[in-house]
Image (spheres, rainbow, N blue to C red):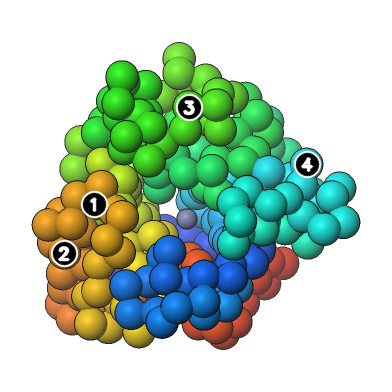
């Protein structure tokens, strides 16, 4: 949108939902530049995009059921999942009935992104074709995907996307392929009337420091694709003025306003 454009931009709003906390006693699992036994807790996010032509939830966070466990759930020796606030309660506060959500976009199929799939029985699920093929193919576990963690996904509702996809046809909400972390990892580029373009870059990097130097996590499924995806995000920043949000960087996310506040 240039100052000379006379058309009115669609009224798009983005709400940031806090959908978990990952307590990590060994950040080197996620960051190639972390030293040994560095403790670093990570934020988990979901997002609600309200567009005149539909409502989209992006990622579903850690399962709300974990909110009932006072000490959270240890999912690996150095990793504990906690849910201080449920996704359900945050949607309730916003007056959003999950049954009316039109689209559920999934960045990828890792457990901390697919925890509440069953909340959205009527949504069209937007997944990259490569993620769908990996997640339901014979090599899922070798590709770091654990089918039992996304067993609630209604495969009849999946719309498989290949590459970038302009959801509403007006450039405001664009699924943005960022493969490498998993075979079909993707981000969401939301262009807001006032805040401008924001790239929900999800797991292309786990810290602003790693993102700044395009450091690739060694256990990603495709290291070369990961490098290209980091470069793609940097190019969106440089050329489009996009703000890049790294989902799990808790320190950086502290500056992001969560619901009921919203960005527009
Ligand atoms: Zn993640």
The mark nearer the N terminus, 2 or 1, is 1
- The picture places residue 16, in percent across and down from the top left corner, at 59, 64
Residue at the disc numbered 4 = 65
Using the numbered discs, state the Cα–Cα distance from disc 2 to disc 4 in whole angstroms: 35 Å
The total of numbered circles placed on residues is 4
Residue at the disc numbered 3 = 147
Residue at the (84%, 50%) spot, across then down: 69
**Residue nearest the observer in this picture, 168 or 255:** 255
The mark nearer the N terminus, 3 or 1, is 3
Residue at the (25%, 67%) spot, across then down: 216
The mark nearer the N terminus, 1 or 4, is 4
Using the numbered discs, state the Cα–Cα distance from disc 3 to disc 4 in whole angstroms: 18 Å
- The picture places residue 45, in percent across and down from the top left corner, at 57, 60
- The picture places residue 224, in percent across and down from the top left corner, at 12, 57
Q: Which mark is residue 227?
A: 2
Marks 3 and 2: CB-CB under 8 Å? Answer: no
């Amino acid at each position: 949108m240039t100052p000379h454009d006379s058309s009115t931009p669609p009224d798009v709003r983005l709400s940031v939902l806090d959908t978990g906390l990952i307590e990590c006693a060994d950040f080197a699992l996620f960051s190639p530049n972390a030293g040994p036994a560095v403790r670093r807790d990570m934020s988990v996010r979901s997002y609600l995009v309200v567009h005149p032509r539909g409502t989209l939830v992006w990622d579903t966070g850690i399962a709300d059921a974990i909110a009932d466990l006072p000490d959270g759930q240890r999912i690996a020796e150095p990793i504990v999942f906690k849910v201080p606030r449920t996704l359900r309660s945050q949607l309730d506060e916003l007056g959003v009935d999950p049954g009316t959500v039109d689209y559920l976009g999934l960045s990828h199929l890792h457990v901390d992104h697919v925890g509440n799939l069953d909340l959205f029985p009527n949504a069209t699920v937007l997944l990259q074709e490569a993620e769908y093929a990996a997640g339901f193919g014979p090599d899922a576990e070798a590709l770091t995907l654990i089918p039992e963690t996304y067993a609630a996904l209604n495969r009849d509702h999946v719309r498989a996307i290949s590459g970038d996809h302009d959801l509403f046809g007006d450039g405001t909400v664009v699924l943005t392929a960022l493969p490498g972390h998993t075979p079909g990892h993707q981000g969401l580029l939301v262009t807001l009337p006032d805040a401008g373009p924001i790239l929900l870059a999800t797991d292309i990097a786990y810290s602003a420091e790693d993102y700044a130097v395009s450091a690739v996590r060694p256990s990603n499924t495709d290291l070369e694709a990961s490098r290209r995806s980091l470069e793609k995000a940097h190019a969106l920043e440089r050329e489009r003025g996009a703000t890049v949000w790294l989902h799990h960087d808790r320190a950086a996310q502290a500056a992001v306003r969560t619901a009921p506040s919203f960005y527009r």
